[in-house]
Amino acid sequence: MAEALKWIRIAAGKGHPNAQFDLASMYSAKGDTTEALKWYRLAAEQGNVGAQIILGFTFALGQGVPKDSAEAVKWYRMAAEQGDPTAQNTLGVAYDHGEGVPKDSAQAVKWYRLAADKGEADAQYNLGLSYYRGEGVSADPTEAVKWFRKAADQKQPSAQFLMGFVYSQGDGVPRDSTEALKWFRFGSRAGPF
């Protein structure tokens, strides 16, 4: 392990972003937040998506740095623009809630759709909510159900619960109490929301 760490330090010092990310992860595991953030930032500035996402969450939560939603969005955007579905969904959430950026439901939908089309379950759920509520897109219960189902099939618990709800109400699907109960059971197995 000492030999591996030696070579990671050398590579990180020479500016290799993956080595910088690995070194940051090692410091993070040891609880050295200052060194971890230093190396995550170096890796992120060179385009390492994992480091960009970690910095985004770090600033969003204020872990080892002052909480700064705008700084979090900066890092999420960098990763999202490289096509990372987790970052795209998280950027959508920022626009949806107006955290670090002005609230903009249309931008939220844009980012949710990019991530949802890549199979990101939370983005599929969020896109379904946008259609259900008519936020950023025209309200369309059928389209909402399409996205809820995609997320629910991936065991996203909130989507499973909402599948139960739409079947119980006949909203976007025919009313079906048996189907509603099935989805409510799936959603409840995942634990509290």
Image (cartoon, rainbow, N blue to C red):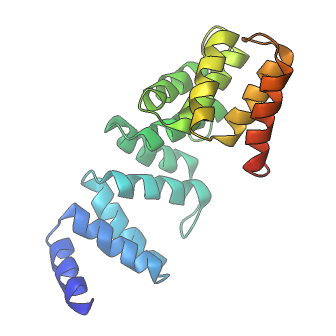
Q: Quadrant of residue 39?
A: bottom left
Q: Nearer the viewer, residue 51 or 45?
A: 51
The residue drawn where x is 85% and y is 16% is 169
Q: On the rendered image, what quadrant is the N terminus found in?
A: bottom left
Q: Position of residue 161 (x, y in %)?
A: 76, 34
Q: Position of residue 55 (x, y in %)?
A: 45, 58
Q: Is residue 168 left or right of residue 52?
A: right
Q: Is residue 119 left or right of residue 152?
A: left
Asked whether residue 140 is in view, the answer is no
Q: Position of residue 70 (x, y in %)?
A: 52, 45
The residue drawn where x is 46% and y is 84% is 30
Residue at the extreme bottom: 2
The residue drawn where x is 75% and y is 48% is 189
Q: Is residue 21 left or right of residue 93?
A: left
Q: Position of residue 159 (x, y in %)?
A: 68, 33
Q: Nearer the viewer, residue 118 or 137?
A: 118
Q: Nearer the viewer, residue 8 or 128?
A: 128
Vertical comparison of 128 with 45: above or below? above
